[in-house]
Image (cartoon, grey):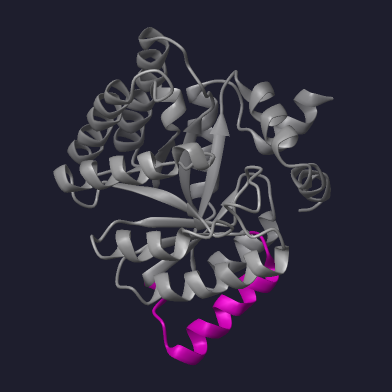
Amino acid sequence: MGRKLSGRFVAGMTVEEALAACARVNGEGIAVSLDSLGESVTVEAEARASASIYHELLDAIHGRGLNANVSVKLSQMGMDFDQALAERIVGEMVAHAEAVDSFVRIDMEGTPYTEATIAMTERLHAQHPGRVGTVLQAYLYRTGADVERLVAQGIRIRLCKGAYKEGPDHAFPAKADVDANYVKLMKRLATSGVFCGLATHDEAIVDAMRTFVREQDVSKSAFEFQMLYGVRRDLQRRLAAEGFGVRVYIPFGTEWYPYFMRRLAERPANVLFLAKNFFKN
């Protein structure tokens, strides 16, 4: 049952299966971000093994002419036991991305990682401008200030609502407040002059952005919509047909089971979200 569920939202176990899924999505005029699943490694050898998959992906993306980049979690690169090691490993990955004209997105995890993730992104961006960006979560109170901090440096941001369980000391407890903050921040990002990704499946927010683009004459090239593999495929295709940039985040790998279990355990709302989308086109 778990494998059937994951098959909708995870593009297989191997690099080849992920690349095949990437090619299929590219065939619909949609870009991709590839994520090799795995978190919280405990020794350097595991971190290096995880990184080797990303180096393989970067070479394959370049060699096959795919419209794709990569997304990586710092806990998968050794952040939990050696922050300097994680930065060296990700720095090597960003340098590789620069060499093959690609891009690395450093994913955001829970609030214990927030400041360290942003700071590492800033340092790597200074070394390799335009080749690395990160993710900000609209449900955190601090995100408005973080947007201004990163935009001022020309660092690309992927804005999402936030998928980790956070308390009211860090995050807006009410969905309405999260949504309102998301809309405010997406408008700021889309007019910042720094290309951004708007990660949402919320059609009300998508429609708000459509209206903003039309009424404020915002260029569609200033941003892209980003969505998860297997979620709202109908909306992905419709937005692409309307001339908006769309990127699909494709996870893959043998760690699909802990990936699902962590996401579902961290935030019960994720269960309903996946269940609703399992039966949609």
Q: Quadrant of residue 230?
A: top right
> Residue 35: x percent and y percent?
49, 34
Q: Where's the N terminus, which quadrant?
A: top right
Q: Is residue 211 left or right of residue 261?
A: left
Residue 214 drawn in magenta: yes
Q: Is residue 220 left or right of residue 207?
A: left
Magenta region, residue range: 201-221
> Residue 220: x percent and y percent?
42, 74
> Residue 265: x percent and y percent?
74, 33
The residue positioned 72% from the left and 63% from the top of the image is 174
Of 258 and 98, the residue lying toward us: 258
Q: Is residue 140 left or right of residue 178?
A: left
Q: Quadrant of residue 73?
A: top left
Q: Residue furthest left?
A: 127
Q: For residue 243, say whether it is visible.
A: no
The residue positioned 39% from the left and 13% from the top of the image is 49
Please determine whether, in this image, residue 55 is positioned above or below residue 249: above
The residue positioned 37% from the left and 71% from the top of the image is 222
Please determine whether, in this image, residue 264 is positioned above or below residue 235: above
Of 64 and 96, the residue lying toward us: 96
The residue positioned 35% from the left and 23% from the top of the image is 56
Q: Is residue 71 left or right of residue 162?
A: left
Of 140 and 123, the residue lying toward us: 140
Please determine whether, in this image, residue 262 is positioned above or below residue 122: above
